[in-house]
Amino acid sequence: MGNCLSLSSATKNSKGNLPVETTFKLPSPIPSWPSGGGFASGVINLGGLQVCETSSFNKVWATHEGGPDNLGATFFEPSPLTQGFYMLGCYSQPNNKPLFGWALAAKAEADASSPSAAALQPPVDYTLVWSSESLNIKKDGDGYVWLPTAPDGYAAIGHVVTTSLEKPSLDKIRCVRSDLTDQCEADSWIWGPPGATIDGFNIYSLTPTNRGIQATGVPVGTFLASNGKANNKIACLKNNNAQLNTYMPNQSQIHALLQAYAPFIYFHPDEVYLPSSVSWFFTNGALLYNQQEVEKPVPIEPTGSNLPQGGSNDGAYWLDLPVDQEAKERVKKGDLLDAEACLHIKPMLGSTFTDIAFWVFYPFNGPSRAKVEFFNVSLGKIGEHVGDWEHVTLRVSNFTGQLWCVYFSQHSGGKWVDASELEFQNGNRPVTYASLHGHAFYSKPGLVLQGSGKIGIRNDTAKSKMVMDSGLRPSLVAAEYLAIIEPPWLNYYRKWGPKISYQISDEIKKVEKLLPGRLKTAFNSFIKSLPDEVLGEEGPTGPKVKINWNGDEVILKV
């Protein structure tokens, strides 16, 4: 097993301290990365502005009620700052997890042309956005949130928090020239008073509005103080550097990142539909079908060299299992020993982060199971489909090579989880759990119900002896900034499985026979509300067709 670490951060510890009072660190020190380029050099030049990442903070003020788990939130100033760099805003996070975050500090390039065109300027004033004086909750005295008033042609990048009604010093923070900024939006909820509504006062983390491989918006680690009526104008930074990818990892650095962070994937003890490599699927009898010649499917070359390239998902072609029944059942089960992670390395958030997407292929997605109040029922053929692609994405800082968070794909969306809330094995390698039959990824074992109320699709995960070390046989299939030669199968844009013809109503009737009368109608309505991907009516498209290939990851709405 190696060294394992699991953190549960939703409650106070035995001594009564809040989780935020403990600073989270990865289980093992971050290694020294191979040299070359600007990756992990500590400072990134955004073109007119240099920025560095600070993850050490001084506490300013805290509230002990409201926010996630009603444990409050704490507000910090980044400190100490590297000499010559200025604070752009305070940092905040909920108290229900260990202190683990970052904020950028900035300094103008040495060759800034003139004071009037300087990249950074102090604010000309402050506006009091909110104070806790009238709030009757547990708090460390009173806190005051200020919005810097930026000079003309400049934008505020963050707020200042104080414990006094006296305005902060104008020299405490810097505003940024507008052409070096980009639009941002509220991301995750940090805090609001007990009983807070979306229209009331709330604190949110921030993320660039436009996110993707080509997007230039850079998050700063600051927060938005929103009064619910008109959000205060806070911007993020923009990467104007003509050499956008200067700070992305080279191939030797990618190899080192995999050694440090490649996740372990655990499968449920009852799982029978395991992953395989794509080439194993092809060489063990997978077939390519053509709508024009349905009766003449053709075997697929090991690299997919005879698959149609590009185009669109027009239904003209699809893949399927071998025709021979014995071969079909064998291929359905995959080959864990032959499985490999297909890697896509991409710049994100203005090339200040590297996303490493680990795509895992399964020849077959098994039938779903549902929980209907106290009943657990098999859904027959519902949920079955040929071909299944799931992925886990690591988000790594290009300033330091620090792993900050991991994305777990879960059917049509997924969830980001901070490193402070992950389980680790063998140093800093995250542990991932694949759900039984459906293969959705989760950060912790147990049951996640996909649905609402007391009826939903079961996503069961547990640790077993079946485990995939994604770093053992990684296959780098794409990294646009490195001009990697992509395998032909990656540019096959059609379905990886056929459209399955079965009567959902017949499958529902089989289940309904097992349910009391009052649950039949509710169950029927729930099944009909599920998307085709969950129902398993047809195979999925490949990784390159997904929205997140060129964009950011898709977050499941809770």
Image (cartoon, helix red, strand yellow):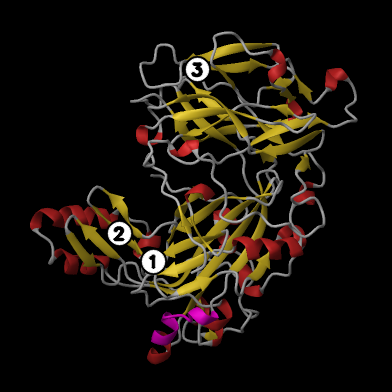
First in sequence: mark 3 or mark 2?
Answer: 3
Real-space CA distance between mark 3 and mark 2, rounded to the nearest whole angstrom: 44 Å
Tag count: 3
Q: Amino acid at mark 1?
A: Gly
Query: According to the image, label 3 marks what residue?
Result: 143
Query: According to the image, label 1 marks what residue?
Result: 438
Task: Quarter of the image for the C terminus: give it.
Answer: top left
Q: Residues within 10 Å of mark 1 (few under 14, many from 20)?
A: many
Given this view, does label 3 or label 2 mark the residue nearer the observer? Answer: 3
Position of residue 65 relative to residue 408, above or below, is above
Q: Secondary structure at mark 3?
A: loop
Res. 143 visible in picture? yes
Real-space CA distance between mark 3 and mark 1, rounded to the nearest whole angstrom: 47 Å
Dividing the picture into quadrants, the one containing residue 114 is top right
Q: Nearer the viewer, residue 37 or 54?
A: 54
Q: Is residue 334 magenta?
A: yes
Q: Amino acid at mark 3?
A: Gly
Position of residue 456 relative to residue 180, above or below, is below
Instruction: Give the residue at x 39% y 15%.
Output: 135
Q: The magenta stretch spans which residues?
A: 329-338
Q: Residue furthest left?
A: 517
Res. 288 visible in picture? no
Q: Residues within 10 Å of mark 2 (few under 14, many from 20)?
A: many
First in sequence: mark 3 or mark 1?
Answer: 3
Residue 52, given in percent of the width and then of the height, sits at: 73, 38
Position of residue 91 relative to residue 375, above or below, is above
Is 482 left or right of 148, judged from the image as shown?
right
Residue 79, given in percent of the width and then of the height, sits at: 66, 30
Q: Nearer the viewer, residue 159 or 512?
A: 159
Instruction: Give the residue at x 53% y 22%.
Output: 231
